[in-house]
Image (tube, helix red, strand yellow):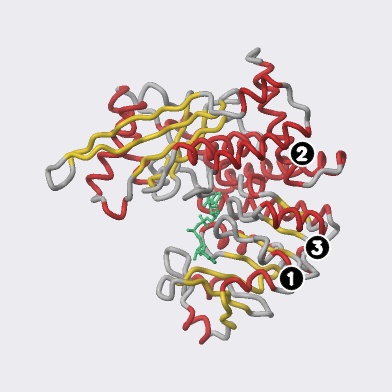
Amino acid sequence: MAAKGSFNAFEMARTQFDKIADVIQLDQAARDLLRSPMREYHFSIPVRMDDGTHKVFQGFRCQHNDARGPAKGGIRFHPQETIDTVRALSMWMTWKCAVADIPLGGGKGGVICDPHHLSMREQEAICRGWVRQLARDIGPTRDVPAPDVMTNAQHMLWMLDEFETIHGAKSPGLITGKPVGMGGSLGRAQATGYGVIYTLREALKELNLRAEQTTASVQGFGNVAQYAIQLYHQLGGRVVCVSSWDQEDQTSYAFLRKSGVDLQELLAITDRFGGIDKKKAAAKGYEVLPGDQWIDQDVEILMPCALENQISADNVGRIGPRVKIIAEGANGPTAPEADAVIHKRGIFVIPDFLANAGGVTCSYFEQVQSNMNYYWEMDEVLGKLDVKMTSAYLAVSELARKQKLYMRDSAYVVAINRVAQACRDRGWI
Ligand code: NAD
């Protein structure tokens, strides 16, 4: 979740944690340990710019908790990056890895910079400089970075190359998000969207619904949404509405076709940022509506797969009477006030850090493959992903049923209990 301006993501992450710590009556030592990152690094990255001047960039890495395994989490390049955003994101990574039950902890990193105004050479220098500052504190058995906002596979390769140069050995398990063929895993593109649907499939079973009898409306048409729609259609469901951001008009549009959207047809008129061409969509018979109307549709399932803070106090009342499930593909799509209304209405929520954990689970698979230097076929990756996501879902839903918890709270209880227990087992607290 992005945290800019006065909103402080770390305060929010701590508030969420405190609420669950009260629910499970967590002891004081565990609270003190888990409320803050165990380690954080602040450092300067001097870079010689293309015009011959030197500029110093500020870099961060937080390792929130590594009781369950090496820290894991992305590196963001953003002009408004703050240490509090990185702290919050590292804490959320701890919970996400724990709820997915993968043997990794939570980390996050960043650099205050804007890649739009940096040449490739300057970006490479930042990547290499970031690793030079942290070469002793990250690694396959310590802390495993990955791409995030405005960083990509090329950045990861430069970082890996610098790390291997410093240590004088190949170490592909240092970092994930590498290109396939250079240490990346097959299935990473599919992983998050498919993971959303593996959990949705289990929720449908639990609610005695058949996918074939359901329709869905999806916000977003990027990586997560596209693969979620693909698998949901394979299960027999029908997506009737998708939405996307229109770069030209600087607004979003929703595309409605009550008989069901055609994924291939839409993909053919979508740019690489997940923006659907509205004129071409209209020509193909889609009704083009204001973007926020994805939420008004008369469907059983809503899948917010675009951005944070999209279901708010302002629009939560517009959710249709037939909606039974919200599967949160995006991070933080539901604002806390809206969440309270959804809870009260009895809509079944598959919370973000469970629903979209397929991405980090596949990154874990990438790390395992890189450490072995042996790479799996697509079927093996997706089969293992399904097993992990299904068991993660079942652990959360079983606890929710037994203790009559809201699914979001149940996911937090599972995650925090697992991490606290690992800290106790190690004798830390
Ligand atoms: P993406 O950039 O591929 O796609 C984003 C989509 O959202 C695009 O179709 C864009 O047009 C659309 N969009 C942007 N603003 C919109 C608006 N106001 N209304 C409607 N649509 C809008 O991003 P992604 O990788 O699919 O990620 C989507 C969400 O899922 C983010 O919250 C991300 O943090 C989260 N997530 C992604 C992954 C992953 O592996 N890709 C993993 C975990 C969580």
328 or 390, which is in the foreground?
328
7 relative to 34, above or below: below
Say which amino acid is labelled 1.
Val
Q: Is residue 135 left or right of residue 16?
A: left
Q: Of marks 1 and 2, which one's residue comes earlier in the chain? A: 1
Say which amino acid is labelled 3.
Arg
Disc 1 and disc 2 in contact, CB within 8 angstroms:
no
Quarter residue 333 falls in? bottom right
Q: Of marks 3 and 2, which one's residue comes earlier in the chain? A: 3
Assess disc 1: are there few (<14), some (14-19) or many (≥20) residues with their C-alpha within 10 Å of its C-alpha.
many
Place of residue 384 in the rendered image (x, y in percent of width and height, measured from the top left): 63, 42
Place of residue 251 in the rendered image (x, y in percent of width and height, measured from the top left): 48, 72
Say which amino acid is labelled 2.
Ala
Disc 3 and disc 2 in contact, CB within 8 angstroms:
no
Q: How far apart, in angstroms, are the residues tagged by discs 1 and 2? A: 27 Å
Q: Can you identify the residue that label 2 sits on?
A: 395
Q: Can you identify the residue that label 1 sits on?
A: 299
Q: Cβ(mark 1) to ligand 1 < 8 Å?
A: no
Q: Secondary structure at mark 2?
A: helix
Q: Which dot, 1 or 2, sits closer to the camera?
A: 1
Q: How far apart, in angstroms, are the residues tagged by discs 3 and 2? A: 21 Å
Residue at left 72%, top 41%?
411
Q: Cβ(mark 3) to ligand 1 < 8 Å?
A: no
Q: Can you identify the residue that label 3 sits on?
A: 210
Residue at left 52%, top 40%?
363
Quarter residue 353 falls in? top right
